[in-house]
Image: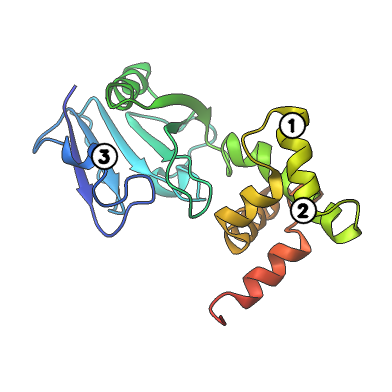
Amino acid sequence: MRYSIQQQGESRSFPAGDAFLGSASADGQVVVHLGTALHADASKAAVLIELGSECLGVHTGERSGEEGSNVLGFARYRNGSDAPSRLIELVRQPNSTPEAIAAAKSVFEAAGFTVVVCTDQVGRIVDRLVRPKYNVALRFLDEGLATAKDMDLTCRLGLGYPDGPIERVERGGLAYHHDVTAALFAVTGAAAYVPARRAQVAKQREGKG
């Protein structure tokens, strides 16, 4: 299925030179918005808008839990400043059309991505799962439970993770972790999402280095 791209500025999901950008056509059945305002078009199989931390409803509006059309949101998972992963989190609303979901999955999967579908919640799937774990690890570091190296080594050898929580959250950026967890806490009010002290310090130091 052909897709076209409307872009303004740098895309977090598809940085300059990404193969997905180069494979777009001038007039596709699916339209992908990267940093541009949403233009709904019912004649398209799907209209996709790249999301940051915001909900899809910010762009489409919401109607008593009955919102939904051929417009979907998406974000390619990326750990802060790391290179983007191959995972696409595709965001649907209660009445999103099955045809639009199928068309979006077809476009992304043809490009080699793995697609998961989730409802319109801040943090989607991955960040809601992993950010509390990073907060716990950062607090353990403050409490002196173990060194960063020992916690990371434990997770790699004991749990089979490719990297440990401290090295991963620091590599992605503690200030970025602050922003993601603060957005989650603002919506959910869950204590697990309160930015850890080290993330708050990093945010306060941002731009001072």
Question: For the residue labelled by badge 3, is the local secondary structure a helix, a strand or a loop?
Answer: strand
* Residue denoted by label 2: 148
Q: Residues within 10 Å of mark 2 (few under 14, many from 20)?
A: some
Tell me the number on the disc at residue 157: 1
- Badge 3 or badge 2: first in the primary sequence: 3
Write down the quadrant of residue 196 in the picture. Answer: bottom right
Q: Of all residues shown, which one is farthest toward the left?
A: 26
Indicate the amino acid at tag 3. Val
Q: Position of residue 164 (x, y in %)?
A: 69, 43
3 vs 2, front mark: 2
Question: For the residue labelled by badge 1, is the local secondary structure a helix, a strand or a loop?
Answer: helix
Indicate the amino acid at tag 1. Leu
3 vs 1, front mark: 1
Question: For the residue labelled by badge 2, is the local secondary structure a helix, a strand or a loop?
Answer: helix
User: Residue drawn 32% across and 29% down?
Assistant: 70
Say left or right for 33 vs 123: left
Q: Position of residue 114 (x, y in %)?
A: 42, 24
- Badge 3 or badge 1: first in the primary sequence: 3
User: Residue drawn 37% across and 27% down?
Assistant: 113
Q: Position of residue 57 (x, y in %)?
A: 46, 43
Say left or right for 72 vs 47: right
Tell me the number on the disc at residue 32: 3
Indicate the amino acid at tag 2. Ala
Query: Which image quarter holds the C terminus?
Result: bottom right
The answer to whether mark 2 and mark 1 are in CB contact below 8 A is no
Q: Residues within 10 Å of mark 1 (few under 14, many from 20)?
A: few
Say left or right for 3 vs 201: left
CA distance separating discs 2 and 1: 14 Å
- Work out whether residue 63 or residue 2 is closer to the camera in this orientation and state it: 2
The image shows residue 43, relative to residue 85, as above or below, that is: above
Write down the quadrant of residue 19 in the picture. Answer: top left
